[in-house]
Image (cartoon, grey):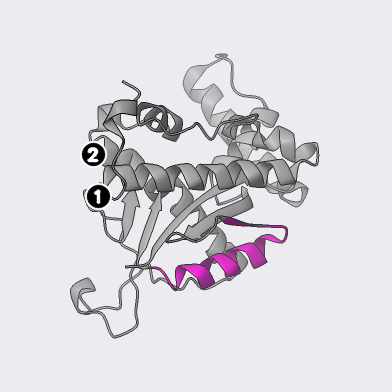
Amino acid sequence: MNKLYFDIETIPAPESAEKTLRYLYERKQKKHKERDGEEEFMTFEEFFEQTSFDGTYGRICTIAYALNNEPVQSFSGDETEMVRKFWEVAGRADLFVGHNIRDFDLPFIMQRSVILGVRPSWDKYLTLGVSKFRLPAGVKYLDFARYMNLPIFDTQWEWNNWREKWSNKTIEHISLALGIPTPKDGIDGSEVWKFYKEGKVKEICEYCMRDVETVRAVYKRMTFEDLPNTESAPF
């Protein structure tokens, strides 16, 4: 089985989307005022920055990945080319592995793929009358169903056995418990936009690659591919 470990870092919408975003912001602001009166509403700047969490308007800054035990690599630059290259690599994989990829990374990439016109190497939709258990030869179906670890192994959900209450554990939270070094060295996800505006794309790529190294190590510990030295266990 070929396993694709990956992570993405995202940034807000481009300046070209400002007119559309201001329209959407004013609509939300109006509804908020009608519903909640004079209660303070977010600023446009806050609304704009929140687009980095939604592939409808936000963008991918970098994608880091590793296939099986190969060295971690990353894509950056033109977003369309990044997405195209990602699906080329993903076409060789049987399993996606990452942290919160079921709810964030993969949906974000799918949204950007639609907007950018890049056809994924995995199908999200089934042909009418075709069961996902009887797909034509060569067809890969990306199933987002809950409580499954194929074709998506999400370390966040698997670590907590799909319990909603405990589902927000970060990769750092888990890795440190397993004695695996934190990937959050000098930057974390909340600082990506700041680093991007400062032209520090290289640092963002390196951070994203560290996340992939960490998630691969966590996955191997969770699936007992890599057993710890009990004498050096952190707790």
Image location (x, y in percent) of residue 60: 62, 52
Q: Position of residue 191 (x, y in %)?
A: 65, 31
Going by the numbered disc 1, the residue's amino acid type is Arg
Q: Which mark is residue 162?
A: 2
Q: Is residue 140 left or right of residue 24?
A: left
The reply to whether discs 2 and 1 touch (Cβ–Cβ < 8 Å) is: yes
Quarter assignment of residue 29: top right
Image position, residue 196 (x, y; %): 74, 40
Look at the image and tell me in which quarter the N terminus lies: bottom left
Q: Is residue 118 above or below residue 185?
A: below
Q: Please determine whether, in this image, residue 1 is positioned above or below residue 128.
A: above
Neighbourhood count class around disc 1 (C-alpha, 10 Å): few under 14, some 14–19, many 20 upward: few
Please state if 126 lies on the left or on the right of 54 as rendered.
left
Residue 166 is left or right of residue 124, and the answer is left
What is the quadrant of residue 201 in the picture?
top right
Secondary structure beneath dot 2 equals: loop
Please say whether residue 100 is visible from this viewpoint. Answer: no
Q: What is the span of residues highlighted in magenta in the rendered image?
A: 73-93
Q: Quadrant of the C terminus?
A: top left
**Residue on which disc 1 sits:** 146
Residue type, mark 2 in image = Trp
